[in-house]
Image: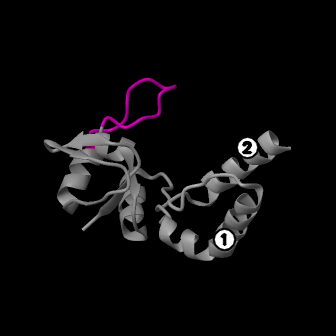
């Protein structure tokens, strides 16, 4: 069954799906959404389907189904769990540097947020 990663909150089949959710739908329903097509205007390259506009394929199999049906190359999403493990050392270094400067941070912040906050802290503290 095709799986999608929700990028933006949207409503699909009378349910609101929030960001970060993995949505699994039947193959037949995916083909129905693809058949709806894209907006007729040339400059707006968006799907009429909320599912295809607000989600990205969560696996290679789903990306291949869409690519086969549309003839366009589609990339599957990369999940951030792998990134958190590979960037753990960088995150700890940034936290240590922020502690040394006396800057506040939240342990839930990811690498990008910590990098931006470190830059801000350096500008403020000189």
Residue 20 occupies which quadrant of the picture? bottom left
Query: What is the CA distance from the residue labelled 1 to the residue labelled 2?
Result: 18 Å
Q: Position of residue 82 (x, y in %)?
A: 53, 73
Q: Position of residue 44 (x, y in %)?
A: 47, 28
Estimate how packed mark 1 is, as few (under 14), some (14 to 19) or many (20 or more) residues with alpha carbons within 10 Å: few
Hey, which residue is sitting farthest left in the picture?
Answer: 14
Residue at (67% x, 64% y) in the render: 95
Q: Main secondary structure of the magenta part?
A: loop
Residue 65 occupies which quadrant of the picture? bottom left
The residue that mark 1 highlights is: 92
Region in magenta = 35-48
The residue that mark 2 highlights is: 120
Residue at (52% x, 25% y) in the render: 43
Query: Was residue 47 drawn as part of the magenta stretch in this picture?
Result: yes
Say which of 9 and 72 sits in front.
Answer: 9
Say which of 79 and 41 sits in front.
Answer: 79
Query: Was residue 43 drawn as part of the magenta stretch in this picture?
Result: yes
Quarter the N terminus occupies: bottom left
Residue at (35% x, 54% y) in the render: 69
SS type, badge 1:
helix
Tally the marks.
2
Q: Is residue 89 placed above or below 76 in the rendered structure?
A: below
């Amino acid at each position: 069954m095709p799986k999608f990663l929700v990028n933006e909150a949207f409503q699909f089949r009378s349910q609101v799906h929030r960001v970060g959710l993995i949505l699994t739908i039947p193959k037949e329903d995916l083909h129905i959404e693809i058949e709806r097509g894209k907006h007729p205007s040339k400059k707006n390259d968006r799907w009429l389907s909320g599912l295809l506009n607000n989600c990205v394929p969560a696996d290679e199999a789903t990306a291949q189904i869409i690519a086969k049906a549309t003839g366009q190359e589609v990339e599957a999403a990369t999940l951030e769990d792998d990134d958190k493990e590979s960037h753990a050392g960088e995150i700890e270094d940034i936290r240590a540097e922020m502690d040394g400067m006396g800057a506040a941070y939240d342990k839930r912040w990811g690498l990008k947020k910590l990098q931006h906050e470190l830059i801000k802290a350096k500008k403020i503290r000189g």
